[in-house]
Image (cartoon, rainbow, N blue to C red):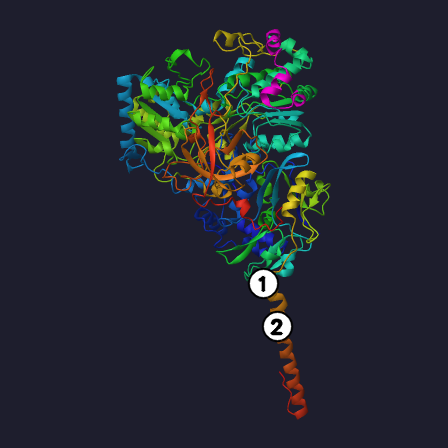
Amino acid sequence: MTTYGMVIDLNRCVGCQACVAACKVQWGAPEAESRDWVVPIGPVRDSQGLVSTFYVGLCMHCDRPACVEACPSKATFKREDGVVVVDTELCIGCGVCISACPYGARYFHEQRKKVDKCDLCSSRLARGEQPACVETCITSCRHFGDLEDPKSDASLHLPGSRRLESGDARLGPNVRYLAGDRQWRLIHDRFAPPAPELSTPAWLLSRVARPLILLAIGATFLGQAVAFFTQLRRGEHPIEE
Amino acid sequence: MSKRISRRDFFRRSGKGAAAAGAVAASTDLLGLTAEVARADRMKARQQGGRVEEIPSLCEMCFWRCGILGQVKDGELIGLRGNPEHPLSRGHLCARGNAGYLVHSDPDRLTHPLIRTGKRGEGEFRRASWDEALDLVASNMLKIRKEHGPSAMAMAPHGMSAFFMKSVLKHFSTPTFSVASFGQCRGPRIAAFKHTFGMDVGSPERLDFERTKMIVLLGSHIGENVHTSQVHAFADALDRRAELAVADPRFSVAASKADHYLPIKPGTDTALLLAWIHVLLEEDLYDRAYIAQNATGLSELRAHVKSCTPAWAARITELPEAQIRLVPRRMARAMPAVVIHPGRHVTWYGNDQQRQRAIAILMALLGAWGRPGGVFLPSRVKLGPCECPPQITPDDHFPIPGGRYPLAEDCLPAQVLLEAILTGKPRPVKGMMIYGQNVIKSWPQPERTRRALLALDFVVAVDILPTEPVLFADVVLPEAAYVERYDAPLKVGSAKTPFVALRQPLVAPPGEARGPFEIARGLALRLGEDACLPCPNVELVLERALLPLGVDLETMRARGVHRVKPGAPYLAEGRPGRFYTKTGKIELFSESLKELGVDPVPRWEPTPDPPRGSYRLLYGRSPVHSFGRSQNNPLLCEIDPVNRLWINDQEAARLGIRDGDEVEIFDSAGKSAGSIPAKVTPGIRSDCVYTVHGFGSRSRLLHRAHDRGVSDTELMLRSVPDKDTGATGMRVSWVTLRKVAPRRRWPRPLASRRPTRGRQP
């Protein structure tokens, strides 16, 4: 078993945005969108003085991804190696997963009319390379690898790492952070994930459309059954071949 | 042809791998991925399969010059990545390095020689042939030399590519060079370290982060100022629990990682340093054996700093006395493994050589020079000459009136040059070649610079983009960008792994743009000065330069980097070191400075405080931008679209300014330089404001950079030249602020546009 994950050491990160630039070049996310982000926070004053840090993010490749649950067409799924991906053949571009993700890790790609997100540079992994953000990082603050393999760079940095979760959202993110308590509080206060919500179209799809479809299918079966038995009762030949 | 490292077939491999991993349709479906033309091309190239070649070369987005691998597919440059073999990048690249290839497809590029048709500064040109353009430059230069002497032809170079042209102008016999890397950057540091240790700390700085136990930064904002391997080494050192002290009026990224943060009053660093020296000497904490063996002038220094007590410095620096006393004690514990970063852009207050001397002396007292964890020693890298005869220097020196700036070396201070242009004194300057240097943006008082450019008889500009000085040129010569050209080989002896690296073309330049050697030789031939560049082509120059290394050009083109055997990094323990000063020792008290009329021991001089209601303008770097060179890059501008003004939260409240509000900034004469968004934070002192340098271009031919943000130098009505080197001290101007309605909708930085849905406080 493989579970790809990342431990981002914010004690090393300087917020230089190299990862964002490398990702944009690699995947060509359109203007104003990107698969990963570095948000500066602060400086602000806390009880101990001045503090600042960076919220470095990408798809968290959660253990229990809300996006997978929300996707009506099953285009979003979690692969066996733990990577959450979008099958663009199946994606209908409804955007339900975008609002379901409490980390804001997905965006709607206007030109493709599909949802796009980080896939941990799967094509690079397949070539034996690291994700673009990991390779370029000028402080090597991103520790990437198989979390099941105790010798992977990510696993070696797991001790003391934290997950960005909240009481509302415990999805088991596989991107983790090393950060000081004060810095972590800054990130957590601002970016702790809210409860994954289903937006209106999602609500419609899951609460209304899906039952309706099921109802329709059920009704069809019922109709068929009724017709069959009616035929039997009337002594006509059953419908066959 | 060159042997290039070939890249594995992207598409085939990724297809296979994806299949193995379980159908990664998502990652390979890249059709119609982007609106950005250049990026779309890159995607297309990747999609179509076939070979992607990786060609090693050198970055020039900043002057760290990391190694890059240019990814070329069917003659198209589709991206860059760090060259793992290069000691200064080791496979990493910053945001600028990643985005740098977009310069090749910048629609604003200069692609043809131009001859001015409108007024200077208007940017009206007509296309010309290279022959016509170069003939015109040569005839004007010869006329100026004939009528006013060679020194009437000035040159303002910046960057590696100016090398060959500098040779030509030296051969032309002009001594009139205004060098940005000295006059607006490292000049005071170079002079101070030469007069203390006999040599500079080098670029890249030979700071032994790998083995240090304590790092001290004075205004150096490592992390925001990005030099790839230095930032990496800095992070490694912090990981190893090296102690960090940061003195900065602003809570920088580096400060946010510090064990000791000293929010020092701007302009008082020298007082802090003298107090630290005082503590080391008074408390007998310095490296006595090292000093006894290697240094002279201890008693003079001791007498000089006797009165520089922590209490004295506390009043000046507005720092707690206990903290001033604590830091040198911590340094003494870590001694000699202490890195005191001397900074790069150090032209701040006009007493900068003195401040740099104090840093050098502090290093000496800690025994850090030539010792593990302090400053390691340079290695010798032998390269053949790239010019012939090599190292020509004109016998003449441009006289500086009143014998000022005795440590100016070969760099004519900008203010002396401008004075000469505007008044003809002490000598007339009638012509100027602006080579890659943005003399309007990088010098203070740009209005004065514009006036001077209007007053010249002849201006020629060599550049890749139409920056503002280019608009003042009579003739514009379009140069190939760093991804399109050869430069003279890069020789780096100031790295632990010394090396020689090659910049080579990854793609052909657009239009008729030419490499620096071709431009320089073209002009040299017309000036009759071609004896300095006798080789007919740059490949031959490189072959000859590489000869002493025992590698040929072919090998260099394939590898990009050639490592050289390192010399001893440290002084032999217990034995006196050799220093290239007058006395052969470390000069705590400098006889040679005294002879030149310069303070032989560093002295603090107060710099005036801003008047009530005004703020001192401080400036620095964004990790995403380099000087004024990167604001036209689409990707970098998307990530960091506009500079913001840091202002203290209490001051902002007083002025009714909230975070994100648009603030208009006025210079000390009340003239507006435009408005930008405010960053309201407790992380800056109340007597100063801060912004990133490089924004606010006035060139309307730079479509993305034009009028984007505010230019710090435009607000500098004052500059105080360093009295020793003449370098332009630029942290001496005041501004006032007013909240205004946004003059335009600034794009928000990429990061803030994330649909982050977390709870806001």
First of labels 2, 1 by sequence position: 1
Q: Return the residue at label 2.
A: A212
Instruction: State which quadrant residue B252 falls in.
Output: top right
Magenta span of residues: B298-324
Instruction: State which quadrant residue B164 falls in.
Output: top left
| Percent x, y of residue A59 | 61, 50
Q: Is residue A198 left or right of residue B161?
A: right
Viewer-side residue, B78 vs A177 = A177
| Percent x, y of residue B82 | 54, 37
From mark 2 to mark 1, how far is it between C-alphas? 16 Å
Q: Type of residue at label 1?
A: Thr
Residue B321 magenta-drawn?
Answer: yes
| Percent x, y of residue A210 | 62, 69
Q: Is residue B71 visible?
A: no
Q: Residues within 10 Å of mark 2 (few under 14, many from 20)?
A: few
Secondary structure mostly seen in the magenta stretch: helix
